[in-house]
Every structure is written in structure tokens, then in C-alpha cells.
Amino acid sequence: MKFAFKAKNAEGIIREGVVDAESRDAASLLLQRNGLLPISLRDESGRSLVTKDLARIWEGVSRKELVAFFRQLGVLIEAKVPVTASLMAIAEETENSYFRIILKEVKDDVDDGASLSDAFAKHADVFSPLTVNLIHAGEVSGGLQHSILFVADTLERDYYLVSKIKGALYYPAFVLGVSAIIGFLVITFIIPKITVILKDFNQSLPWYTKAIIATSDFLSAYWWTVVAGVVVVVASFVYYIRTPDGKKTWDEQIFSIPIVGRIAQYVYVARLSENLGVLLNGGIPIIRSLSIVSNIVGNMAFQAVIADATEEVRKGGNMSTAFFRSKQIPHLVSQMVRIGEESGTISVILKSVSGFYSQEVDGMTNNLTALLEPVLIVVLGIGVAILVVGILLPIYNVVGSYA
């Protein structure tokens, strides 16, 4: 339980804060052991949990915010500012209310004697196992400030990689989405009013015009059914891919999508090699490193590959052997990893692999953006042409025949 306290120290100075204890009496005893005379204690557990949950649902913590946090923390520690003071200073400047709550809890845990890595580990939804282990390695080696900046660099590269792909896909998704909505509204509500002319003249119409009219009449009468059907299908798909079986199927099938599948493969290869190289370079044992990377790689197909590699290493073999058996890992990567294992430069090789595939992703996303623009123009042009040829041209011919 958490208790907000107001207490007086031996010099008579008032101190305020939050203390973890099993009960109010235990909290009072804990304060007295630390040289503080309790003035007031208020149970904050229920209220703080509700506030925290609402803030988490509403805001969460983005990669960008984590990068900024670790940059600021590294700078403050380099300037010899105590860890708790650094955490409090950053928390007070953070606009994200959920992240502010997390940082204050981390600060309180450090105040109570916990290490920074242990305090981070309590918030697995914000700080990944990779981050916790790198911070722990820095604490053990005495290079905490270096580890913090190293975490910031790692998160920033991952953030840039993901942002690059999202940026390449958001534009066509937005254009196609808006076009589909506009097309649906035109066919459902506008076309029926225009085709009244064709129906009144009772002329023989081409098959494609009849098809458009029939589709328009159906949507005009049952548009709500179509909208409900689309919502149900989308919701069912989203729900399915969030289940273990659905996620596994989606993670395997995504590599079959043209162009996008190759980009996804390169992203996961870059993430795998980047994070594994960082952990090995930080002195984390290889089996532990593989276990951590498995939790953060973000794809169940790659998790299976990493699990296979972990078992291979546990038996005394090399992880490159498992990589060669996988269809998700490019043959070039497996060869380079084997060279690194044989030469003892595996962390250096993994860093090179990560850099190469990150550049490949960068180039492919640029090419994808350049390719999609003319494709979108052609698709939209075909849609307009269908309406012109199927509706406007017959109307012009009918009106012209009676002119």
C-alpha cells in the first residue's frame, strides 16, 4: 500500500512524500526508522491506482518520450545530479501524466534503496527487458551514464526505423481510405438521383451501367447493412490477430505480402541484430540476451527462430546453425553470424548487420513511397473513369438522342 506522508525530521524541517508499507502502522514505523516524525499519513493506494490506470489507457508512453527521457537523464547524471533529483526534475517537466506517475514511483523506489534497474523492472509496460538489463549492466560496471545514453541511442534507432515505415504507409492508407468513403457516399446517395434520368427514358443500357445502377440501388436501400458488415469484419479481424493463434498466423503471413513483407523481414532482422549486439556488447550472457530479444522483437515467427537458437546454444552449438534452418533469416545474415561466432566478434558483426538492413529498409520505404504515388493516381483515375463511362456517358447519349 502507498501512503502520502507529511513528517518532521530532527532539524524540524517538514518533509513530504510517498512511502510503501503493508499498513498505516508499518508506514509510521518505517518513517521513524528513517529519522522522521510522522505528522499525517494518507492512504493513496486506491486513488493512485485508478488515476494511473486511466492515464495509462488514455496516454501510455511512446518511444519518442522514452528517447527524450533517457537523453535528459543521461545529461543530468553526467552533470553529477543525483539520480532521484534527476528523476524528479524530469517528472515535473513531463507533460504525459501517466509517465509522470511512473517516474515518481521509480524515484520513490530508488529513495527506498532499490537500484534504478530494479525500479524500472517494476514497470514492464514502459521499460523493456532490454532497457532494464542494459541499465543493470551499467550499474554493475560503474558506467551508468554511458548505459543510459546507450539505451537512448538504441531506442532512437528503433523509433526512427518504425517511424520511417509508418510514414511510408500512412499516406497511401489515408488516400485510399478517404477515396473509399467518398466513393461509397457517391454511389449510395448521389448516383441513385442521377440514374433516375436513365430509368425514366427506359433505354437499353450497357451491362456495366446496369451493374453500377444495381449496386447503387442496393447500397441506397441497405447502406446501413454494408457499414455494419464492414465494422464487424474489421473488428473481428482486429480481435483475431490479438489472440495468440491469430497473432501467430498474422506474424507468419505478413512476410508473404509483396514488398511490405520484405520490408517487415528486414525490420525484424535489424531489430534482432541491433538489440542482440547491444546486449552482448554490454556483457549479458548469450542465452540471457537471446531470451530478452525474444520478448522485444515483436514477431512470433522470429520468436520461434530465437527460441530455436537459444536451445541450440544451450546444447553447446551455435545460434547461426538455427538461423540457417530458418526461412525468416536471410542466408547472408546467417553466414555473417557464423563468421562472428568463429572469430569472436559477434557483437561487431551484429552491429554491421543491423546497420546494413536499417539502410535497406530506409531505401525500400523511399522507393515504396515513390512507387505508390503513381499507383494511387492510376487507381483513382480508373474509379473516376468507371463512373464517367458507366453513368455520365449513357446519360449524355440518352439526352442527345432526344435533343
Image (tube, rainbow, N blue to C red):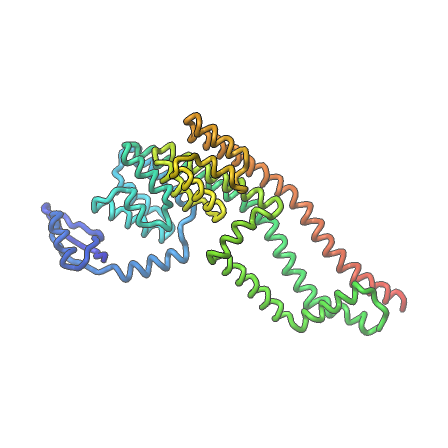
- Which picture quadrant has residue 366? top right
Could you tell me residue 343's position as x and y percent?
43, 25
Q: Is residue 326 left or right of residue 184?
A: left
* Residue at (36% x, 41% y) in the render: 131
From the viewer's side, name the closer residue of 213 and 400: 213
* Direction left: furthest residue: 10
* Residue at (76% x, 66% y) in the render: 211
- The C terminus - image quarter: bottom right
Q: Is residue 95 left or right of residue 240?
A: left
Could you tell me residue 30's position as x and y percent?
14, 52
From the viewer's side, name the closer residue of 329 and 317: 317
Residue 357 sits above or below residue 345 on the image: below
From the viewer's side, name the closer residue of 50 and 39: 50
Residue 124 seen anywhere in this rendered image of the structure:
yes
Residue 398 sits above or below residue 17 on the image: below
* Residue at (64% x, 70% y) in the render: 223
Q: Is residue 315 left or right of residue 382?
A: left
Residue 401 sits above or below residue 348 on the image: below
* Direction front: furthest residue: 315
From the viewer's side, name the closer residue of 284 and 88: 284
Residue 151 seen anywhere in this rendered image of the structure:
no
Could you tell me residue 38's position as x and y percent?
13, 55
- Which picture quadrant has residue 25? bottom left
